[in-house]
Amino acid sequence: MSEKIVYMDYASSSRVDPRVVEAMLPYLRELYGNPSSQHSVGSKMKGALEEARAKVAALINAEKPSEVVLTSGATEGTNVALRGVALRNRDRGNHIIASKIEHISVLNTLKYLAKNGFEVTYLPVDRYGTVDVEALKSTITDKTTLVTVGYANNEVGTIQPIREMAEIAHSKKAYLHTDAVPAVGKIPVDVVKDGIDLMTISSWDMYGPYGIGGIYVKRGTRVEPLILGGGQEGGLRSGTENVAGAVGMGKAAELAMAEMAGDAERLSKIRDRIVERVLKEVPYSFLNGHPTRRLPHNANIRFSFVEGESLVLSLDMEGIMLSSGSACSSKTLEPSHVLIAMGIPHVEAQGSLLISLGRFNVPEDADRIADVLPRIIKGLRQMSPIAPEEVR
């Protein structure tokens, strides 16, 4: 293995920014206390918690900091949003609409709801992974209480027309939820401008600590809590708050507001360099997702006649770390449900590589991966029983 590790798997896990760690350290060492306590120590912790909440709210332009509900992470947040809205609004209807390319945490939550009396309709996407807005118009009914579509896809990076879908949802008095984990902190997300009612947020996706995330819940949205107890987080998520984690998440949000534009410009240049070289130098290679309406740090490239897992392992031996798809669904050997929904054949989808860049990547990383990929692809194709002679 090469000495220098090049990490390009930020979609599955990101490094915590050292400035975030520094902000958290006092709350892991000398500062302690329960934010619900009435004494001065508790009040100090409550103040730190609310300051952090305000920073997250500012990042997404929430009208009130109290609209940000802190959770243990994005998966819990998604469960609170989807199950909480479905159960609380069952008197109005039992119909939910989602896209076929949602994150596995969304899809599995919807499967649970489908087993418990709810009807779920899945919207198709086009070859770029863009959700079909016309299909939403034709499937939404007066019984629809919730529409959930990811702000941007975590695998192929395609950014969705959320504002347009929110308008359609609201025309039937349905709520619009979006899993914005891949997008918040990477591109501007404005919950007011986009008409979002509920939104899932993650801390570590914007270089914050693990074990904390949140949901934006617009004032007036009817949500049934899933965790009962002391009534923390506006009654939607009981349990003593993770103050140190919240402080870290707040600092990460603050840094994202200040550095998002610069990070996006820099990372998109690195991404474009990778895509340009790879598509030019590797025959039968193709970019998955929308060519322009995509996250600045994402490149998903598929290679014909190559198996993705072998490609990832080969790159690992070169000191380059990335993945073949979503880490949250990597335990299955099935091809990506996102790529299949986009109409890519199974055998082609198996040969995809997810390159997700982050704040700590440098321009030299682009040439590092582009230099080794042609050799690796050629070697794997030489061993492939389905590769034609001209590409071996």
Image (cartoon, rainbow, N blue to C red):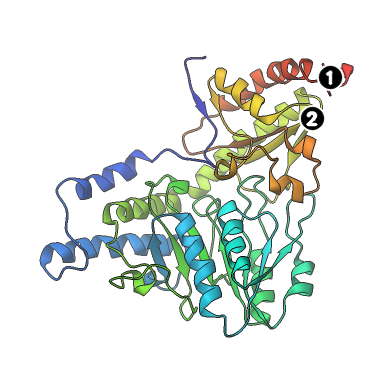
Tell me how far mark 2 sits from mark 1, CA to CA.
10 Å
Q: Earlier in the sequence, mark 2 or mark 1?
A: 2
For residue 61, say whether it is visible: no
What's under tag 2, amino acid-wise? Ser
Labels 2 & 1 near each other (Cβ < 8 A): yes
Which residue is located at x 81 percent, y 25 percent? 283
Residue 44 versus residue 12 in the image, above or below: below
Label number found at residue 391: 1
Residue 151 versus residue 264 in the image, above or below: below
Left or right, 337 with respect to 74, comes to right
Label 1: element kind: helix
Left or right, 307 with respect to 386, comes to left
Q: Quadrant of residue 298?
A: top right
Circle 1 residues within 10 Å: few <14, some 14–19, many ≥20: some
What's under tag 1, amino acid-wise? Val
Q: Quadrant of residue 197?
A: bottom right
For residue 307, say whether it is visible: yes
Label 2: element kind: loop
